Image: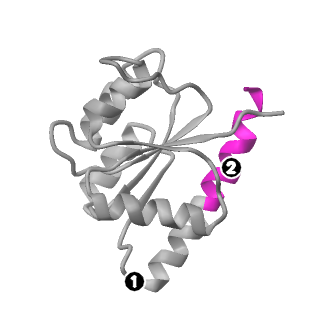
Amino acid sequence: MNPQIKFLLVEDNELDAERINRTLKKLALDNPVIRARDGIEALEILRGQNGKVKLTQPYIILLDLNMPRMSGIEFLRCLRNDSQLKNAYVYVLTTSDRNRDVVTASQYQAAGYIVKDLTKKKVIHTFELTLRHILTSCQKLYKQY
């Protein structure tokens, strides 16, 4: 039996974090969700530093870009430069639709880039489908664990 895939949600906005959690519950996904409020806290969780319990594989990172202390792009750069973390699956969930952010996230091997507007019904449905697809795809990739 494969271990359950965990989500590391890196999101500073309380409302967006709650909407993402509700969406996961609505989809009947009982995968654990661990939340970090910025890139620094996310790295501490991934590395088991500063009193944080280390997050073990398998996991999927859902990453906001616009955060205090360490932005999502800075987090991606640190992640990809860390030999233990560089192969993590990261999906960007952000309000930024700037081409520069999309290109930069792609350069840091983001597995996907989703512009979130969790107030519109059509976007919420697309987000739900995307989350289900992410989980299904990653379950296949993580069969080795």
Quadrant assignment for the C terminus:
top right
Under tag 1, what secondary structure? loop
Residue 105 coordinates in the image, percent (x, y): 36, 45
- Circles 1, 2 touching at the beta carbon (< 8 Å): no
What residue appears at the point 57 percent right and 44 percent down from the top-left corner? 32
Q: Which label number is shown at residue 120?
A: 1
Magenta stretch: dominant SS? helix
Furthest residue in direction left, as rendered: 69
| Mark 1 → mark 2, Cα distance in angstroms | 26 Å
Under tag 2, what secondary structure? helix
The mark closer to the camera, 1 or 2, is 1
Query: Which residue type does callout 1 highlight?
Result: Lys
Residue in the foreground of this view, choosing between 111 and 143: 143
141 drawn magenta? yes
Q: Which residue is mark 2?
A: 137
What residue appears at the point 62 percent right and 32 percent down from the top-left corner? 58
Q: Which residues are magenta?
A: 132-145
Furthest residue in direction bottom, as rendered: 121
Residue in the foreground of this view, choosing between 52 and 109: 52
Quadrant assignment for the N terminus:
top right
